[in-house]
Amino acid sequence: MHFNLPRHIVVRGESMLPALKPGQHCFVLPYYFSSPKINDVVLARDPRNNALIIKRIAEVQKMGEHNLYTLHGDNAAKSTDSRQLGQWDRKNILGRIFV
């Protein structure tokens, strides 16, 4: 998915409680002039099935010109994230979530 304007999404699931609730409406803005950073809530592509997921960046591992991102759900008990799947490449982080 590539997009240039803010995109409207609706939160599904409980992995980001209490910050984001199921059914809550949000916008996604691509990173035009900045890079994803720790504590950003982002829309990412699940590496297993390409589904869209919302997670918080917990860590950025700088690998020269290539960064790896650790993504966590705020509600660990209901989240499948880097704790199970490992780190995400930058190409799979699609934008930052705004409420």
Image (tube, rainbow, N blue to C red):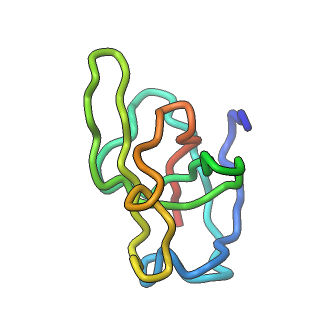
Residue at image coords 41%, 49%: 86
Using the image as rendered, state which of residue 88 and residue 3 is in the foreground: 88
**Image: 79 above or below 1:** below
**Image: 4 above or below 84:** above
Using the image as rendered, state which of residue 36 and residue 73 is in the foreground: 73
State the image coordinates of residue 39 (x, y, percent, origin top left).
Answer: 31, 56
Q: Quadrant of residue 5?
A: top right
57 displayed left or right of 42: left
State the image coordinates of residue 75 (x, y, percent, origin top left).
Answer: 41, 79
14 displayed left or right of 25: left
User: How many marks can you see?
Assistant: 0
Residue at image coords 35%, 29%: 67
Q: Quadrant of residue 95?
A: top right
**Image: 96 above or below 30:** below
2 displayed left or right of 71: right
Residue at image coords 60%, 59%: 53
Q: In the image as oriented, which residue stretches furthest toward the top?
A: 65
State the image coordinates of residue 43 (x, y, percent, origin top left).
Answer: 57, 52
Residue at image coords 64%, 72%: 11
State the image coordinates of residue 16 (x, y, percent, origin top left).
Answer: 48, 74
Q: Quadrant of the N terminus?
A: top right
83 displayed left or right of 85: left
